[in-house]
Amino acid sequence: MDFDVVVIGGGHNGLTCGAYLARAGHLTAVIERRPIVGGCATSEPLLAEHPEFLFQGGATELLGFADQPVYCDLELARHGLELIESDPHFVMPFPNGKHIFVHRSWERTAESIAAVSPEDAEAYARYYSLWGGLDEIIGPFYSRIPPIPGRRPVPSGAHRPQDDLRRRFTSLPGRLAPVPRCSAPLARRCARRMPPRWPASP
């Protein structure tokens, strides 16, 4: 059979591209080498000795996904997709047997951190206060393209304001958490909102 488009890789991005192409009337094939499709959006038994436990290999965050165009355009709920928000959605164990749970509630997260380090709990509260103010400004653009007035190509090596913002965010964990225990969960949250600039990125 001849296809108009062949998508290599049946991860969540490949499936999304294939679905939109098919909706547009193109005869589309999505090819995946693994016996299961979905990529990092799958739930699989990653521990051979405990197949009863399922894990998300890509640790996909579903927060706000129901507002995304792909969820609405492809009518995923009608096709059986059920979004289950976990709480706590992140745990960080320590070699001494203690652990930190990161909840959707920052107050409960701070309580969990306080059981390990009260100083880090105060740092986490300061971080949340800082991000809360920024979130009110940029939060509306999570599900839509933000306006970029007067955007033009930036010469290689030129100063870019977003680099300053990225540098400030990636240094937050060390500045807010004087005790290292809290740096990892803070770094994770910073990375999700301000990913590092890879050499090939624009």
Image (cartoon, rainbow, N blue to C red):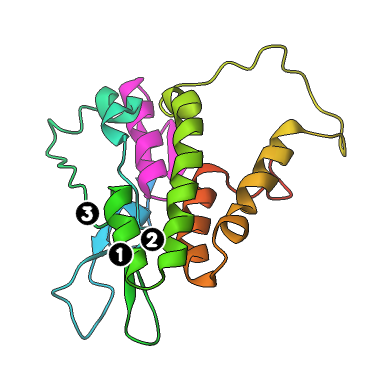
Q: Residue at x 24, y 82 (%)?
A: 48
Tell me the SS state at disc 2. loop
Q: Position of residue 25 (x, y in %)?
A: 34, 20
Q: Residue at x 65, y 54 (%)?
A: 171
Q: Which residue is mark 2?
A: 33
| Cα–Cα span, label 2 and label 3 | 33 Å
Q: Is 100 situated above or below 85?
A: below
On screen, residue 9 versus residue 112, left or right, reads: right
Q: Position of residue 28 (x, y in %)?
A: 37, 34
Residue type (three-letter) at the residue carrying disc 3:
Asp
Residue at far top of view = 150
Residue type (three-letter) at the residue carrying disc 1:
Ser
Which callout, 2 or 3, points at the residue further toward the start of the chain? Answer: 2
| Cα–Cα span, label 3 and label 1 | 13 Å
Q: Which residue is mark 3?
A: 87
- Residue 96 belongs to magenta span: no
Which callout, 3 or 1, points at the residue further toward the start of the chain? Answer: 3
Q: Is residue 91 visible?
A: no
Q: Residue at x 28, y 48 (%)?
A: 105
The part of the chain drawn in magenta is: 3-29
Which callout, 1 or 2, points at the residue further toward the start of the chain? Answer: 2
User: Relative to the observer, which residue lies in front, 54 or 168?
Assistant: 168
Q: Which residue is mark 1?
A: 112
Q: Residue at x 26, y 24 (%)?
A: 72
Front: mark 2 or 3? 3
Report crowding for label 1: few under 14, some 14 to 19, many 20 or more residues within 10 A (C-alpha): some
| Cα–Cα span, label 1 and label 2 | 41 Å
